Image (tube, grey):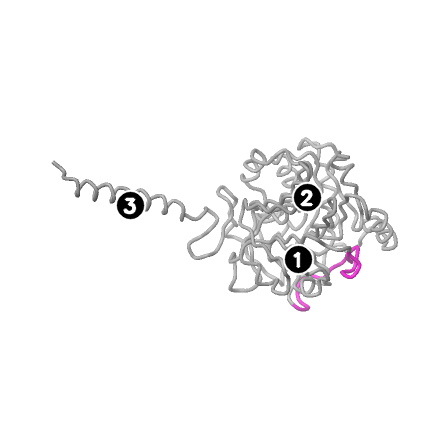
């Protein structure tokens, strides 16, 4: 027969085991956090082909074959951009500055995404040169309240722009371990996947998974996180998805967060043949058809193609992405007019795009 003292000890041991197990479960890291402190893509994401053989020599040789002629209709004249900036001052709008840089105005909050205003995408004078100028100069942009950064690649995290950015009181939202680059800013918020931050009563931002990677040097591969931003404004949902490849995660996100009213997604930088074995495929960047499939999986009502027409990051013809994007829209359940291609410098009314007053 167990006496009272032994019974108390047994109960204490069992309680201790219970709380230890609870603590162990609580301390388990999410799938995308690796034990060495680096990160990985969501479960079920495509893997990089082991046959990839990167060569700057081959890339530059193939790049010379590209027609670098930029049609006039690809870029809005600067005078008109400045006029539209004044015209839409009190409106909710979205404007493409170039590549992955957008201005998004929602009520009293003006957002900028992945701002890159430098002449090249790389350290110092290295990296791909810009072949179309940004629609606005850095000193011409309106007051920015919210700065969204998706990942640390040079065509998204531009240190020259970050240093010279005129609105250092803006709230900065960025992935884990990137805050160190924003020491001169006052409101810097690192986010893990599925973190939410309430900006005001009408605006909430959620950081969501993407199929990509991170790297700025020879020794920091995947040491900082990457992801997409879901902007929820008065019940309307805008997903800024850049950069990303295709992956099973988007069906999950569509089921959990969809339908999405407007998806902005990369449609360029997918052809690295002959360095990669496939001519039209990149694990880390959707091609135009894959971008439409991702938008379809997200249950998106409309989709804007971006991340093209600014830098030569890959070997597809520079004006190919928007043509394929529009031509294949209906195959993925979109009307052609709902698969949207902006000119650099174009403004669009969000009230019209998202159908609200």
The earlier-in-sequence mark between 1 and 3 is: 3
Q: Which mark is residue 311?
A: none
Q: Which part of the image, by quadrant, shows the C terminus?
A: top right
- First reached walking from the N terminus: tag 1 or tag 2: 1
Q: Mark 1 near mark 2, Cβ–Cβ under 8 Å?
A: no
**As drawn, is 28 to the left or to the right of 161?**
left
Q: Which residue is mark 3?
A: 16
Categorize mark 3 by other alpha carbons within 10 Å: few (<14), some (14-19), many (20+). Answer: few
Query: Which residue is farthest bottom?
Result: 124
Q: Which residue is mark 2?
A: 264
Main secondary structure along the magenta-highlighted residues: loop
Q: Is residue 277 magenta?
A: no
- Residue mark closest to the camera, 1 vs 3: 3
Q: Nearer the viewer, residue 77 or 308?
A: 77
The kind of secondary structure element at disc 1 is loop
Horizontal and vertical percent position of residue 24 = 36, 47
The residue positioned 74% from the left and 42% from the top of the image is 323
Q: Position of residue 64 (x, y in %)?
A: 72, 59
Please provide the residue range marked out in magenta.
Answer: 124-141
Residue 195: image location, x then y, percent: 55, 46
Nearer the observer, 51 or 357: 357
Q: Residues within 10 Å of mark 1 (few under 14, many from 20)?
A: many
Residue to which mark 1 is pinned: 155
SS under mark 2: strand
Task: First in sequence, mark 2 or 3: give its number.
Answer: 3
* Gap in angstroms between the C-alphas marked 1 and 3: 51 Å
In the image, is residue 337 above or below residue 157?
A: above
* Residue shown at the point (57%, 50%) measured from the top left: 212
Image quadrant assignment for residue 152: bottom right
């Amino acid at each position: 027969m167990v006496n009272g003292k032994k019974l108390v000890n047994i109960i204490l041991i069992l309680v201790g085991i219970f709380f230890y197990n609870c603590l162990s479960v609580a301390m388990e890291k999410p799938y995308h956090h690796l034990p060495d402190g680096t990160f990985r893509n969501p479960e079920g994401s495509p893997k990089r082909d082991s046959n990839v053989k990167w060569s700057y020599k081959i890339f530059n040789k193939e790049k010379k074959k590209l027609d670098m002629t930029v049609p006039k209709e690809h870029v809005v004249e600067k005078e008109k951009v400045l006029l539209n900036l004044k015209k839409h001052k009190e409106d909710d709008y979205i404007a493409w500055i170039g590549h992955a840089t957008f201005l998004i105005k929602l009520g009293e909050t003006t957002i900028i995404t992945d701002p890159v205003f430098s002449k090249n995408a790389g350290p110092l004078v290295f990296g791909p040169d810009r072949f179309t100028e940004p629609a606005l100069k850095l000193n011409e942009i309106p007051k920015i309240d919210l700065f969204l950064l998706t990942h640390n690649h040079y065509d998204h995290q531009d240190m020259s722009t970050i240093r010279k950015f005129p609105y250092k009181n803006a709230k900065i939202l960025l992935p884990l371990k990137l805050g160190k680059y924003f020491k001169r800013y006052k409101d810097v918020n690192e986010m893990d996947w599925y973190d939410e931050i309430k900006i005001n009563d009408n605006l909430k931002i959620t950081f969501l998974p993407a199929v990509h990677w991170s790297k700025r040097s020879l020794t920091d591969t995947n040491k900082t996180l990457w992801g997409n931003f879901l902007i929820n404004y008065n019940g309307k949902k805008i997903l800024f998805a850049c950069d990303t490849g295709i992956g099973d995660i988007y069906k999950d996100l569509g089921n959990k967060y969809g339908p999405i009213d407007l998806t902005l997604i990369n449609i360029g930088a997918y052809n690295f043949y002959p360095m990669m074995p496939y001519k039209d495929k990149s694990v880390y960047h959707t091609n135009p058809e894959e971008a439409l499939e991702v938008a379809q999986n997200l249950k998106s009502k409309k989709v804007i193609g971006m991340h093209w027409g600014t830098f030569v990051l890959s070997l597809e013809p520079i004006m190919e992405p928007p043509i394929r994007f529009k031509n294949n829209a209906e195959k993925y359940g979109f009307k052609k007019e709902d698969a949207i291609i902006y000119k650099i410098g174009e403004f669009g009314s969000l009230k019209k795009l998202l159908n609200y007053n």
